[in-house]
Amino acid sequence: MGKFILFALAIAGLPSLATAAIVADHTACLKFEKLPDEAFSSVRNDLRIFYGHTSHGSQLMMGAWMLEIEDPDLYDRPTCQEYTDDLGELGDTNWVQPTRDWLNTHPECNVVMWSWCGGMSTNTEAGVNIYLQAMSQLEQDYPGVIFVYMTGHLDGTGPDGILYRNNNLVRAYCAANDKVLYDFADIESYDPAGTYYPYETDFCNWCTAWCSTHACPTCLACAHSQCFNCYQKGKALWWMLAELVGVVPVEGQSLGSLKASYR
């Protein structure tokens, strides 16, 4: 199925943040280690999350849970309502109305998330554009909301595959229009040393090699993948949320006034 994640920050009076793109990719996993303690409390205090996903999307939540087990006080997860209805395929817009319904009926909600499953591996360019256009329409209809875009998980087809083409369309759009992007595929493409695996899959074979020589946390299960892949996804999620509440500045841009603007 073709579900995707979108994050929407719907805070009353929130100013435009479209002065530079924010990208949560494999480097966000490293930046996570430098987050100040107040980043986590700020996210918990300021954000209320609605997250729709199938199995692949559960990787983010498992990663967040792994971090919470590691340090329950510091990494206690923010408020999140999970939604698991099976909506969305190949760039259709079945996810749009539930998004509107939730935002319209839950004014306390300020983060909305939907996750791609395998749809980006078979999507057409037209289908990707449908997704981008639908996101743009939501941005117009909810001018106080920040929508965060996302790529689809790796499938082993490499740089010449359909998935890479479609993911790059989303990346290029976000870069050109100063959007916020959670780059799911990029996180799966690099180990912590920065080694690139262009033909990797969502299973994360490099995770096995990495954890054979490094201490890695365990988990109950990481859907379709290795626990360390979920762990990395959780780190990138926390880093991005910290960016959105203004705790961590974007390179070349100060977001320090963001929280003050809506408190």
Image (cartoon, rainbow, N blue to C red):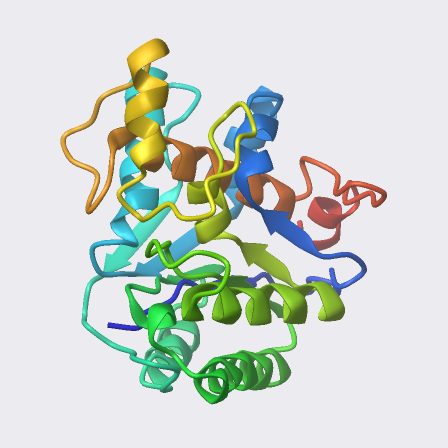
Q: Quadrant of residue 141?
A: bottom right
Where is 202 relative to 111, above or below?
A: above
Residue lying at the far right in this picture: please name it. Answer: 252
Q: Quadrant of the N terminus?
A: bottom left
Where is 113 relative to 125, above or below?
A: above
Q: Quadrant of residue 122?
A: bottom left
Residue lying at the far left in this picture: please name it. Answer: 220
Q: Position of residue 237 (x, y in %)?
A: 47, 42
Using the image as rendered, state which of residue 65 and residue 155 is in the foreground.
Answer: 155
Q: Position of residue 183 (x, y in %)?
A: 51, 52
Q: Position of residue 111 (x, y in %)?
A: 47, 58
Using the image as rendered, state which of residue 69 and residue 177 is in the foreground.
Answer: 177
Using the image as rendered, state which of residue 254 and residue 222 is in the foreground.
Answer: 222
Can residue 147 be seen here? The reply is: no
Q: Position of residue 236 (x, y in %)?
A: 49, 39
Horizontal relation, residue 144 to residue 218: left or right: right
Horizontal relation, residue 244 to residue 229: left or right: right
Q: Quadrant of residue 19?
A: bottom right
Horizontal relation, residue 124 to residue 53: left or right: right
Q: Which residue is depicted at the point 25% across and 76% down? A: 87
Where is 207 relative to 57, above or below?
A: above
The total number of labels drawn is 0
Using the image as rendered, state which of residue 262 and residue 148 is in the foreground.
Answer: 148
Q: Which residue is depicted at the point 44% across and 56% down? A: 158
Q: Which residue is depicted at the point 54% across and 79% down? A: 132
Where is 249 relative to 87, above or below?
A: above
Can residue 28 be seen here? The reply is: yes
